[in-house]
Image: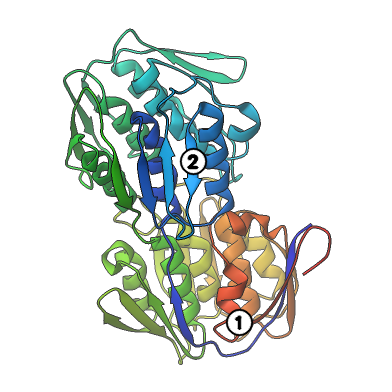
Amino acid sequence: MSRMVIDGGFPLSGSVRINGAKNSALPIMAASILCQGPIVLKNIPKLNDVETMAKVLEALGIKIQINDCGDWKLSSFSGVNEEAPYELVKTMRASFFVMGPLLARRKCARVPLPGGCAIGVRPVNIHLKGFEALGARVGLDAGYAVAKADKLIGTKVHFDFPSVGATENLMMAATLAEGTTIIENAAREPEIEDLADFINSMGGKIKGAGTPTISIDGVNELGSVEYKIIPDRIEAGTFMVLGALSKGAISVENCIPVHSGAVIEKLREMGACLDFQDSRVIVSGKKRLLPVELKTLPFPGFPTDMQAQFMVAMCLAGGTSIITESVFENRFMHVGELIRMGANLSIRDRTVVIKGVEKLKGAPLVATDLRAGAAMVIAGLVADGRTEVSKVHHIHRGYQNFVERINALGAKIQYFDGDGDE
């Protein structure tokens, strides 16, 4: 079992460059199905989830080449298969993104119901209802979602909830549909805009991405393009929180501050010092942080993917903080791990009350999911003594070279793979 051993309490300082956004790269890679290619993607992060998506695409018939600069060339001149492999899709929820573009290109898609982090029930019925609205015949067959259509026809779709995945999947399906599709109550995340920009650069006609109403005029075909993925706002936010707890200053570079607006405002409210220089944010927190209240919400609200990292900061703040999780119903599994470190937390339904303590103490911890894993590493870095975090394979799903980059800031982390070797 992979693990990290962390000697905490060292001041951290220096700079860290933010990689491409995982949550942009995955749907954009899936959208390559829409075009025969070739497509060249730049700033793709080196992550386990990206590797999984690449394997899914290759199984579907997409040819992938990666050059020495890390640019990805994707093409499917010989066509694509209509069925995604179960053994891959079951491991990562984002694999379900291939259903929309497969339906658009092949008029038939057979994709296993997805897996991923156990952070709550995330049904795909909202995706399937969107496909049905476009004219597809949708059903379930032995654990697979199946959609078929003689042709897709543009229509108006209203989401009960602004689902990011459903917005992206329907947007891709509608790109090659006949007529105009209107998505109401669409998700507004920056990754939605990035996907729309990518499709438009291939010749698509998408308007309103980043707003609650998105309009897609269907086109007959898309053309080749070279495209650069935006920086990862969650990775940037994670390092910003680390900077606020670092007893030094961390320069978070190659980020887009407006994408982290809610995170930045909460850090300011907690008393962290932030200095902005174009695509760089320098964060320090030499004084004890102040308590805050926050509620996770869809963008532009506070991101659920930053909840666990902020909880660590609140554990050390001077007073009582409150977190309400409104996006996922099972995303407090890291609370018990922080209690093992001496944190004072109590859960009631979807709310955690955090009474700040003077210090955390090193302890054996478990990374229960991707973002909780990053939070456990942050907790170990600011705790007294030694912390061992197990099941850190979750972290590799969303953070590239995490240990090396944090150690470059002055941390003392040892990584051991599943065989016990560094």
Determine which residue is flagged by label 2. Answer: 64
Which quadrant does the N terminus fall into? bottom right
Up-down: is 422 above or below 409?
above
Q: Which residue is mark 1?
A: 382
Residue at position x 61%, y 53% in the image:
369
Q: Earlier in the sequence, mark 1 or mark 2?
A: 2
Q: Is residue 156 left or right of residue 26?
A: left
Please state the horizontal and vertical placement of residue 272, each as a whole percent of the image. 39, 83
What's the mark number on residue 23?
Answer: none
Q: Quadrant of residue 208?
A: top left
Tell me what residue is drawn at x 38 percent, y 42 percent.
28
Q: Residue at x 53, y 38 (%)?
A: 93
Q: Secondary structure at mark 1?
A: helix
Q: Tally the marks.
A: 2
Q: Residue at x 60, y 74 (%)?
A: 404
x, y percent for residue 192: 30, 45
Q: Amino acid at mark 2?
A: Ile
> In the displayed image of the protein, which residue is found farthest to the top?
150
- Left or right of 348? Residue 238 is left
Q: Quadrant of residue 295?
A: bottom left
Q: Residue furthest right?
A: 419
Residue 248 sits above or below residue 280 on the image: below
The residue closer to the viewer here, 73 or 176, is 73
Name the kind of residue labelled 1 in the image: Val
Quadrant occupied by the C terminus: bottom right
Q: Secondary structure at mark 2?
A: strand
- Please provide percent x and percent y for residue 381: 62, 79
Horizontal placement of 162 versus 61: left or right? left
Q: Is residue 275 visible?
A: yes
Colour approach in the figure: rainbow
